[in-house]
Amino acid sequence: MRLFYLFLPAVLACIGSLYVTHDSHASDQFEGDLDSSVVAPAEAASPFAPDETEEFPEARTYGAKDQMHEIHGVSEVYKTRSLVGSKKLALTFDDGPSADTTPQLLDTLLKYDVKATFFLVTGKINDKTRPIVQRMLREGHTIGDHSIGHDDSRMQSEEKFRSRFLQSELTIEQMKDLAVTEQHLPRQREIYFRFPFASYGYQKGYQNMNVIKEISNKLYGENCINMVFWNMDTADYVSGMTKEDVYHNVKAYFQGGPAVTYHVEKDHRITKKPYVVTNPPRGGVILMHDIHQHTVDAVPMILEWALRAGVEIVPLKSIKEYSFEGKKCELKPEFRKMN
Ligand SMILES: [Zn+2]
């Protein structure tokens, strides 16, 4: 029973995103909710307890059974257990950079002196947005890869996935190179990837986690690409969400209470659905999107509340599961484009 409740939201996310991928505009807005609507029973503290799971789950070998949320999926492996109950919050923003909204968000983060991680759609990096990415690095934020074009790997052959993943990773590395050569910053060591729609696993005859490991070995000579999911979903991608909705969702993950998630309608529309968080994780990685004005407007409210509530905003790289301490992870020289 517990497993059913854990996986139901991810199943809905899977279904929902499959349908919305037919609409390119909708697909860019939609992210799967992995566990935000879980109303866990009291004994459900156990999924967060230490177990045999490796801290760096990418190190394991993936097989045909590792599909999306199933078996070793997000619900168990990627819950960022070390933060549960910690009153610590890692801010992550996907789908940018946006020339309109991202600079406003960076202003807010600077004002409150907090660091975030941006999962960039690398196909959006151009002459207009490249300075925004460079500003992220200059101001101490972390950049990660969110694919070239918000790709859904379920729709890709192994060959296509491999070539586009490699290209996207190299674009992120070029952004790091630029920060070193033009801004004289230390090179960002951390290498993070977040699957659009959380759609990882066994796809069309191949296991894309193993392809990622292969590419990591090619680029870095070791297993360095760390997958990042989330355990708190603001549902900021759902149409009709307001800044207040986003703010209340964040609070509910710490204090419990009313929140908003999404619902997949019979006609496949994604709509707002109220629910109550009864067993809040009180710490974790939160999913937001810097391409939405209501999200950007919610962030000052969230940060003011965090100050009052004693919730600490921590960078992803400081968290045990996302730490690169002890790992070298240097891009091989032949892949660098220093100029
Ligand atoms: Zn996304």
Image: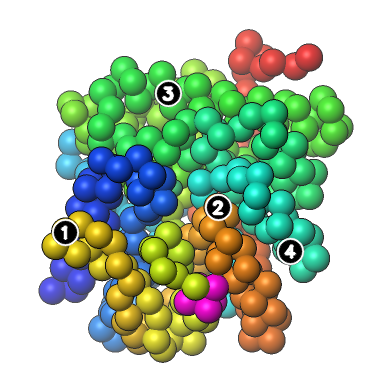
Residue bearing the label numbered 1? 267
Q: Helix or strand or loop: what does disc 1 sit on?
A: loop
Q: Residues within 10 Å of mark 2 (few under 14, many from 20)?
A: many
Locate residue 152, reporting x and y percent.
32, 37
Going from N to C along the chain, the mark reached first, 3 or 1, is 3
Q: How crowded is mark 3: few (under 14 residues within 10 Å), some or many (20 or more)?
A: some
Answer left or right for 76 relative to 102: left
Image height of 338 relative to 151, above or below: above
Give how far apart the Cα atoms at labels 3 and 2 are.
23 Å
Quarter holding the N terminus is bottom left
Q: Looking at the magenta stretch, what is its main secondary structure?
A: helix
Q: Residues within 10 Å of mark 4 (few under 14, many from 20)?
A: some
Give how far apart the Cα atoms at labels 4 and 2 are.
15 Å
Which-is-in-front pick, marks 4 and 1? Answer: 1
Q: Which residue is drawn at 25% across and 40% down?
A: 22
Give how far apart the Cα atoms at labels 3 and 1 are.
32 Å
Task: Say whether marks 3 and 1 touch (CB < 8 Å).
Answer: no
Residue bearing the label numbered 3? 164
Task: Say whether marks 4 and 3 touch (CB < 8 Å).
Answer: no
Which-is-in-front pick, marks 4 and 2? Answer: 2
Q: Which mark is residue 291?
A: 2
